[in-house]
Image (cartoon, coloured by chain):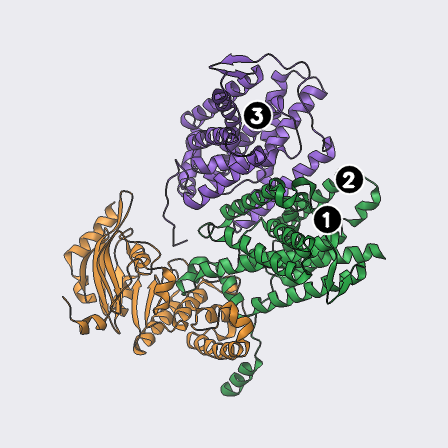
Chain colours: A green, B orange, C purple
């Protein structure tokens, strides 16, 4: 039973990561492949505060703040870049953050990592059992998905999508595309920070090897599989890509081979989706009118 | 010096602007103005710098020298979104819609004051929703005006070429801008669509809008324009009514010269 | 021997490898305006194929070397045809994500075949270093510099003198114009992938002869070579060579000033700075953005 709860918790964490990455890549069109850095910043921020005896909510806020700050730091200088240049710049940013995690030993203990991160405690209740943790993780995932959905469906989200579709046309309509791009990256980073905080409290140990490029690739794969610009797609993508490689566990392979097989699976999914179904499993939904009132009125008028 | 009054009458004033790309003198001292309520055509042989002038006016290209005024205000080298928000809308030579958004969304994104800030999502939701409803109604009206109302839920990428051109024009109207700039509005469309587009432009003029457009189709230009500005090598060589331009020797030479090389 | 001379020598050796790999990035970008993310993995593949032939099967290095280059060249050819060509008119992110996929695929394939542990070409004793201008350089390092210089000169001659080389430059200048004057653009693209991949493979074996082989060796070399490409001006062949040498030198001299743990981060920091302040590179041409499309 604990095994299934474990899987469910991971799915919740990755839903947050995939949906927040989708906000940046799928909706705003900014190919960011340094998402694991924001995840890592959040995890370290939450872990360090928790280890110094601060409450969970403070660590969570700090995780959001510092991850968001990271988003700001990378997005402001990269504003003029797009497409492949942006991808490589964010990749570089991710690697610099990882070099910091490894080498800033006075803060992060370097490759030794941070062990003994306490479990979540809210209002004096400790959520140390896996099922208790699952409730928290699921709740937070639902909130994050809800918030991002709200943004996307609002005029704000429409501007983000217009930037993805055609920056120049968006600008010619008076949109301050710079502001929107920065906001999208910062918000996406903040939510990745939330996921990082959950991860740190759940696993109770973090080290730099968790927040690698491979981790970003996994998130990217979830987003691409589900469909760029589809929130439901990212949720399904996250669930599928956590569940599908699980049977590999029972093949009793050496751990490096199992990890390689998993990576290979992700790679094949990425390539096949791009070649044969670039819109992903679900594809983007069409945003039609939500007010039928107009339609009715028009019907009357034309009758 | 122009008096303040005439400045206001002139919606757009382009004063001796220059833009060189390396050795290429794309714009070389062009100067013209557009009065309120006028339809002005910008013509010239290929490579005369028409589209570059458009891009300079709308802030997509920074000019090296000269001044550009919009409704009396200096807009030289301001950011494109800043210029757009002052009430100037344009189309591009190639169609620039948002292909994977619906026709209705394409219209709504062109509208102003749509509560597009992130804070509105959470702090003024009710107002935002009301505004959305209003915008939807207005968008539908405009789509009816251009004859695209049946396509509101279609993705822009699925429209025919002519319909996309119509949608582009409809979008510029949706911005509520008083000054509209069209880069080759009639290029590549069939005769029926051409008539539709010229009808639209005339209607817009009746509504008091000011229009500047680039076009190669001379019949269209002669039919539509109150005033024609002829560019050659980035400089204006003639300005006048369509009739005056037709008989202008310099213009004929420029076009023939263009054919020879 | 002086430390400065040694660091400069090390920088030039590393730099000539980066230059070899950077050439592939720059040629592909020049023609397709696309960053082939999997290029670093082709470098890694070259090293492993060389190792398999030479160490595992005992093929002499003089034969193993060109064979590995040919294998990788062929791989580059098929990679382009199968994975990238269908996406040529897709949005930029599509081939890019595919390339990321290919790169991860090749890495995991290498782990599955060869294991994650390091492999090494070295069989006997490390040869005595030669004293050159105050630095100690091993014969292998000397080989690296000579072979890579020869390959770069050959490439230069190829681009300047041959018909297909001229076609390459024409396509890089303007693909549409090139195809209207009768240049077979698809052929040029294939040639570029083959040559770029073969050069990367050469770089891989050369590095493998001196350092250890790991399945992830392509990642950091790939990034550094890419940085070199940007530094030199993406699309420029001499720029790639200069950029490669520059990155090699900066990185090796840089460890004088900052903790060696950050050595790999140096390239990333240069990359970010370049992208932010001078994305056109040192030799790249400045292009006004085309607003029409």
Q: Position of residue A294 (x, y in %)?
A: 53, 82
Measured Cα–Cα span from mark 1 to mark 3: 42 Å
Residue at 73 percent across and 47 percent down: it is A115
Res. A54 image quadrant: bottom right
Asked which secondary structure carries label 3, the reply is: helix
Asked if residue C195 shows in the view, the reply is yes
Say above or below: B244 vs A39.
below
Q: Secondary structure at mark 1?
A: loop
Q: Is circle 1 on the same chain as circle 3?
A: no
- Within 10 Å of disc 3 (Cα), the crowding (few <14, some 14-19, many 20+) is many
Percent from the top left, x then y, of residue C282? 39, 36
Look at the numbered discs 2 and 1 and tell me whether their residues touch, using CB distance below 8 Å.
no
**Horizontal side, residue C46 vs residue A75: left or right:** right
Mark 1 closeness class: few <14, some 14–19, many ≥20 residues within 10 Å: some
Tell me residue A87's x, y (percent): 54, 47
Nearest the eye: A68 or A241: A68
Q: Residue at x 52, y 63 (%)?
A: B158
Q: Quadrant of the N terminus of chain B?
A: bottom left
In the displayed orientation, state which residue is furthest to the front. Answer: A53
Is residue B157 shown to the viewer in this render?
Answer: no
The disc at residue A205 is 1
Residue B205 relative to residue C267: left or right: left
Q: Which mark is residue C240?
A: none
Tell me if C212 is positioned left or right of B43 in this view: right
Residue placed most toward the observer, C205 or B221: C205
Residue at image mark 3: C202
């Amino acid at each position: 039973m604990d095994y299934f709860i474990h899987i469910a918790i991971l799915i919740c964490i990755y839903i947050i990561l995939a949906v927040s990455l989708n906000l940046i890549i799928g909706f705003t069109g900014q190919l960011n492949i340094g998402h694991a850095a924001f995840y890592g910043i959040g995890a370290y921020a939450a872990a360090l505060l928790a280890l110094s005896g601060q409450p969970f909510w403070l660590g969570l806020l700090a995780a959001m703040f510092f991850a968001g700050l990271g988003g700001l730091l990378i997005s402001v200088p990269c504003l003029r870049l797009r497409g492949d240049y942006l991808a490589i710049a964010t990749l570089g940013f991710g690697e610099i953050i990882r070099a910091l995690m490894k080498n800033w030993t006075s803060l992060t203990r370097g490759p030794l990592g941070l062990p003994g991160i306490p479990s979540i405690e809210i209002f004096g209740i400790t959520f140390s059992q896996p099922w208790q943790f699952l409730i928290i993780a699921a709740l937070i995932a639902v909130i994050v998905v809800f918030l991002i959905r709200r943004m996307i469906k609002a005029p704000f989200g429409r501007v983000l999508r217009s930037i993805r579709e055609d920056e120049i046309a968006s600008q010619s309509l008076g949109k301050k595309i710079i502001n929107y791009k920065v906001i999208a990256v910062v918000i996406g980073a903040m939510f990745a920070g939330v996921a990082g905080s959950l991860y740190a409290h759940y696993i109770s140990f973090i080290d730099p090897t968790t927040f690698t490029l491979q981790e970003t690739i996994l998130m990217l794969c979830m987003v691409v599989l589900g469909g760029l610009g589809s929130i439901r797609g990212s949720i399904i993508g996250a669930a599928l890509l956590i569940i599908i490689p699980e049977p590999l566990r029972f093949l009793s392979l050496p751990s490096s081979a199992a990890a390689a097989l998993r990576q290979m699976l992700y790679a094949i999914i990425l390539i096949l989706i791009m070649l044969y179904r670039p819109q992903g499993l679900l594809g983007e939904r069409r945003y039609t009118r939500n007010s039928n009132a107009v339609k009715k009125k028009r019907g009357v008028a034309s009758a | 010096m122009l008096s303040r009054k005439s400045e206001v009458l002139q919606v757009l004033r382009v004063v001796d602007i220059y833009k060189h790309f390396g050795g290429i003198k794309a714009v070389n001292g062009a100067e013209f103005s557009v009065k309120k309520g006028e339809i002005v055509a910008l013509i010239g042989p290929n490579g005369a710098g028409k589209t570059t002038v458009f891009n300079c006016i709308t802030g997509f290209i920074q000019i090296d020298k000269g001044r550009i005024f919009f409704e009396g205000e200096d807009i030289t080298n301001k950011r494109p979104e800043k210029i757009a928000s002052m009430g100037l809308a344009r189309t591009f030579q190639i169609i620039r819609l948002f292909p994977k958004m619906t026709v209705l969304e394409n219209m709504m994104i062109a509208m102003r004051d749509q509560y597009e800030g992130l804070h509105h999502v959470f702090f003024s939701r009710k107002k935002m929703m009301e505004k959305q409803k209003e915008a939807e109604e207005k968008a539908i009206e405009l789509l009816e005006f251009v004859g695209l109302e049946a396509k509101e839920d279609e993705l822009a990428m699925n429209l025919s070429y002519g319909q996309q051109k119509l949608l582009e024009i409809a979008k510029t109207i949706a911005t509520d801008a008083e000054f509209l700039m069209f880069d080759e509005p009639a290029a590549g469309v069939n005769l029926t669509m051409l008539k539709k587009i010229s009808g639209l432009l005339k209607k817009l003029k009746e509504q008091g809008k000011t229009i500047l457009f680039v076009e190669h189709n001379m019949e269209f230009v002669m039919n539509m324009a109150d005033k024609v500005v002829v560019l050659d090598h980035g400089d204006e060589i003639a300005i006048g009514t369509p009739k005056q331009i037709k008989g202008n020797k310099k213009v004929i030479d420029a076009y023939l010269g263009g054919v020879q090389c | 021997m002086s430390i400065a001379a040694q660091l400069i020598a090390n920088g030039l050796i590393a730099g000539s490898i980066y230059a070899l790999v950077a050439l592939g990035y720059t040629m592909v970008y020049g023609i397709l305006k696309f960053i082939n993310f999997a290029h670093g993995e082709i470098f890694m593949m070259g090293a492993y194929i060389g190792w398999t032939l030479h160490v595992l099967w005992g093929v002499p290095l003089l034969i193993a070397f060109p064979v590995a280059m040919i294998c990788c060249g062929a791989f580059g050819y098929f990679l382009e045809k199968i994975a990238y060509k269908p996406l040529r008119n897709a949005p930029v992110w599509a081939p890019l994500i595919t390339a990321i996929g290919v790169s991860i695929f090749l890495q995991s394939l290498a782990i599955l075949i060869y294991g994650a542990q390091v492999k090494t070409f070295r069989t006997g004793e490390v040869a005595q270093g030669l004293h050159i201008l105050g630095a100690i350089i091993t014969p292998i390092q000397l080989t690296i510099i000579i072979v890579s210089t020869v390959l770069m000169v050959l490439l230069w001659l190829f681009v300047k003198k041959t018909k297909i080389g001229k076609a390459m430059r024409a396509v890089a200048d303007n693909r549409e114009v090139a195809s209207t004057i009768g240049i077979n653009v698809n052929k040029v693209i294939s040639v570029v992938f083959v040559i770029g991949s073969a050069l990367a493979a050469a770089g891989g074996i050369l590095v493998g002869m001196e350092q250890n082989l790991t399945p992830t060796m392509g990642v950091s070399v790939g990034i550094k070579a890419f940085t070199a490409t940007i530094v030199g001006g993406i699309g420029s062949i001499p720029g790639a060579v200069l950029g490669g040498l520059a990155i090699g030198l900066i990185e090796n001299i840089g460890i004088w000033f900052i903790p060696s743990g950050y050595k790999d981060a140096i390239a990333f920091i240069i990359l970010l700075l370049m992208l932010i302040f001078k994305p056109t590179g040192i030799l790249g041409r400045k292009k006004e953005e085309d607003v029409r499309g």
